Amino acid sequence: MTSKELFENIIKKRSFLCIGLDTDIAKIPRFLLDTTDPIFAFNKQIIDATHDLAVAYKPNLAFYETLGVNGWNSLEKTVNYLRYKFPDIFIIADAKRGDIGNTSSMYAKAFFDHMEFDAVTVAPYMGEDSVKPFMTYVDKWVILLALTSNKGAADFQYITENGERLFEKVIKISKEWGTTDSLMYVVGATKAEMLGDIRNIIPEHFLLVPGVGAQGGSLKEVAENGMNSQCGLLVNSSRGIIYAANDETFADKARNAAMAVQKEMSELLEAKGLV
């Protein structure tokens, strides 16, 4: 999927919502445990209830890996369901991989050849040769960690040398590794005030912005500081949508929560003159 196609879907749905499928078997409704694949059963109902409101889904791989082979099977079934039932959806593997080149090549094959994700999150610490293997795939994306919203981000990301913070240096160097059709960046919603600084470096790239909703990030501030002429944002909400209820109404309540976010997104797109 190209940035143009992604933007067209944003305009069509009046939404730049990404729903995080951080599916925890300890948190899903108990009645689903009687199904043959509770994780997939939960994901399928969430997807069926929200697919017209979202442009992307982002399974967090840790929640699947913790279940061993059963979790991987649930993940693969989820991706396959999205790919063939809703082909306009952008699917992100939230894997945060980052290793030497030949290992990265194997990760890229797993996510892009075998499981048909559109994008994978990657850590930049080991440099260009650890990222490039993911970027050899046509119409696939690397989503590079740039500025995260966790407390520990201050340990390294704000280290300043000659007036430049480390996260800014990471973005300036890495933007040369790909294009606006292959490289996206993670910027936490709780750091919305820094989006302007980031946009000065990468005005045209898409940003994946987690942290809206349960983590307290402001969607309005993210849009004001980070939206560009092609929207340029995928804003993720996970717990605030998928765990809106814990009973037989969970899918309906998830839809209501997603609809509230999409309504605000529609208004922000309209205010920007994009719809």
Image: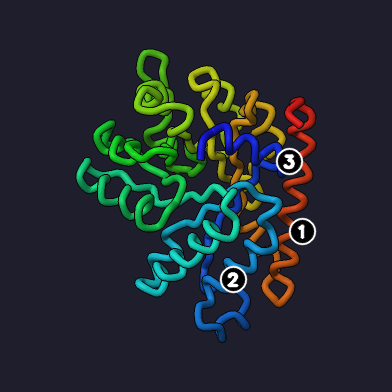
Q: What secondary structure is found at the residue carrying circle 3?
A: loop
Instruction: Give the alpha-carbon distance from disc 1 to disc 2, as whole Å.
Output: 16 Å
Q: Which residue is mark 2?
A: 42
Instruction: Give the alpha-carbon distance from disc 3 to disc 2, as whole Å.
Output: 25 Å
Q: What secondary structure is found at the residue carrying circle 1?
A: helix
Q: Seen from this angle, which residue lies furthest bottom?
A: 34
Res 134 quadrant in image? top left
Q: Seen from this angle, which residue lies furthest top?
A: 162
Looking at this view, is 208 or 13 the one in front?
Answer: 13
| For residue 11, side relative to residue 99 (left or right) | right
In percent of width and height, residue 58 lies at 52, 52
Q: Which residue is mark 3?
A: 14
| For residue 237, side relative to residue 67 (left or right) | right
The C terminus sits in image quarter = top right
* Three-letter amino acid code at the position of disc 3: Arg
Q: Which residue is mark 1?
A: 256
Sequence-wise, the earlier of marks 1 and 2 is 2
